[in-house]
């Protein structure tokens, strides 16, 4: 920085951001300073060396949906206005550093090739990033010494991002759980909100403020039952028992999801061993997908509308399944 010295403080837990590592993951609750820490760290790195930095999220309809504003606000507050030029859709450093902004859901294996030269990728709100997007992004970011950073508040333990970087982190990955008490600059206004949530909305408190996964989708009919099953360690991987019939239970849909669970019954136990969820897929195609699984099939259980005849074909979902 031309002989200048810039002194900035960071939460203790984020010191690893300045060490070389392929994956740097910060997750946790609200007010922990995750996004601000990453934004400030990347701005500093962009001064020390020339970087091409992609700021990504799953869906970005315009640059207003990105972290462009956060970075733009931090540049003057950090005293870095002499080093960065803020443009409408890009931020450029005087040394050639670039901050780019893009959504991932709209990318394909071909279109994402333009990002191959990125040396740093910051995935914000990464809990929403799909498996497809990760599978396209990760092999594309392959410049020597390139790194992928992610910040997120977790939702469900089954989300791909949580499974990929928390449950089963890859090699050369640092994953840090960070909450409000790790942020020395946690503001009073958020402390008041936190205490209010703890008192009035205790069911959501652990997710919002402590960064724990939700036991079930908010508002689900069986949310409390699933939470109890999780607390009692009753959610686990169940092996297929070839001696038992596999029955299917259907929630019919087309534009909305078609969901099929596969269960086995053993005495008083109902074991859910497999699951399919698809969109814009007909019943016969779903049946074909099921038949590809090497199970000892039993009965199909349909809702009442599964027995209604379709006006154009004269066949019901039950008739279609019967043919299989």
Image: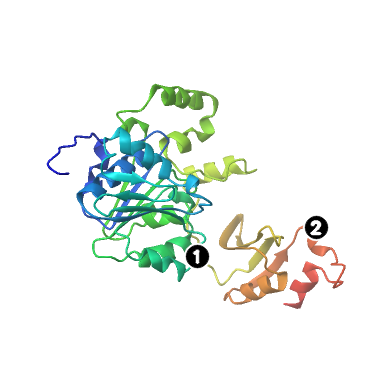
The residue that mark 2 highlights is 304
Q: Which quarter shows the N terminus?
A: top left
Query: Of helix, strand and loop, which one carries label 1?
Result: loop
Q: Percent from the top left, x then y, of residue 106? A: 52, 61
Q: How crowded is mark 1: few (under 14 residues within 10 Å), some or many (20 or more)?
A: few
Q: Residues within 10 Å of mark 2 (few under 14, many from 20)?
A: few
User: Looking at the image, which is closer to me, 238 or 279?
Assistant: 279
Residue 101 sits above or below residue 108 on the image: above
User: Looking at the image, which is closer to me, 40 or 283?
Assistant: 40
Q: Percent from the top left, x then y, of residue 60? A: 50, 52
* Residue furthest left in the image: 3
User: Looking at the image, which is closer to me, 118 or 313?
Assistant: 118
Mark 2 vs mark 1: which is more N-terminal? 1
Q: Residue at x 48, y 42 (%)?
A: 231
Q: Percent from the top left, x then y, of residue 121? A: 35, 55
Q: Residue at x 61, y 54 (%)?
A: 268
From the viewer's perspective, tell me whether residue 318 is left or right of residue 110: right
Q: Percent from the top left, x then y, of residue 199? A: 51, 23
Q: Which quarter shows the C terminus?
A: bottom right
The residue that mark 1 highlights is 239
Residue 90 sits above or below residue 259 on the image: above
Marks 2 and 1: CB-CB under 8 Å? no
**Image quarter for residue 178?**
top left
From the viewer's perspective, tell me whether residue 118 is left or right of residue 280: left
How far is mark 2 from mark 1, CA to CA?
30 Å
Query: Which one is in front in this view, the residue at disc 2 or the one at disc 1?
Result: 2
User: Looking at the image, which is closer to me, 320 or 87?
Assistant: 87
């Amino acid at each position: 920085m031309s002989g200048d010295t810039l002194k900035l403080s960071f939460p203790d837990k984020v010191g690893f951001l300045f060490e070389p590592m392929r994956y740097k993951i910060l997750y946790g609750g609200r007010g922990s300073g995750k996004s601000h820490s990453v934004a400030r760290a990347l701005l500093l790195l962009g001064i020390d060396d020339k970087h091409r930095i992609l700021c990504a999220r799953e869906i970005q309809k315009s640059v207003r949906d990105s972290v462009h504003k956060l970075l733009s606000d931090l540049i003057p507050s950090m005293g870095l206005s002499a080093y960065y030029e803020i443009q409408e859709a890009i931020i450029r450093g005087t040394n050639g550093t670039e901050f780019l902004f893009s959504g991932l859901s709209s990318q394909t294996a071909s279109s994402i090739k333009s990002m191959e030269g990125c040396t740093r990728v910051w995935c914000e709100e990464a809990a929403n990033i799909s498996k497809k997007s990760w599978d396209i992004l990760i092999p594309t970011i392959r410049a020597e010494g390139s790194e992928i950073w992610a910040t997120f508040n977790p939702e469900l333990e089954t989300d791909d991002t949580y499974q990929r970087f928390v449950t089963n982190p890859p090699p050369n990955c640092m994953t840090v759980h960070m909450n409000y008490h790790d942020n020395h600059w946690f503001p009073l206004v958020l402390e008041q909100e936190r205490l209010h949530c703890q008192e009035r909305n205790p069911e959501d408190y652990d997710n919002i403020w402590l960064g724990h996964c939700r036991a079930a989708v908010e508002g689900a009919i069986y949310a409390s039952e699933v939470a109890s099953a999780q607390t009692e360690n009753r959610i686990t991987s169940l092996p297929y028992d070839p001696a038992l019939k596999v029955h299917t239970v259907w929630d019919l849909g087309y534009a909305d999801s078609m969901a099929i669970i596969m269960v086995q019954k053993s005495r008083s136990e109902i074991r859910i061993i497999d699951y399919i969820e698809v969109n814009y897929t007909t019943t016969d195609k779903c049946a074909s997908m099921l038949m590809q699984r090497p199970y000892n099939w039993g009965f199909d259980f349909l809702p009442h509308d599964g027995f209604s005849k379709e006006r154009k074909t004269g066949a019901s979902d039950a008739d279609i399944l019967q043919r299989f």
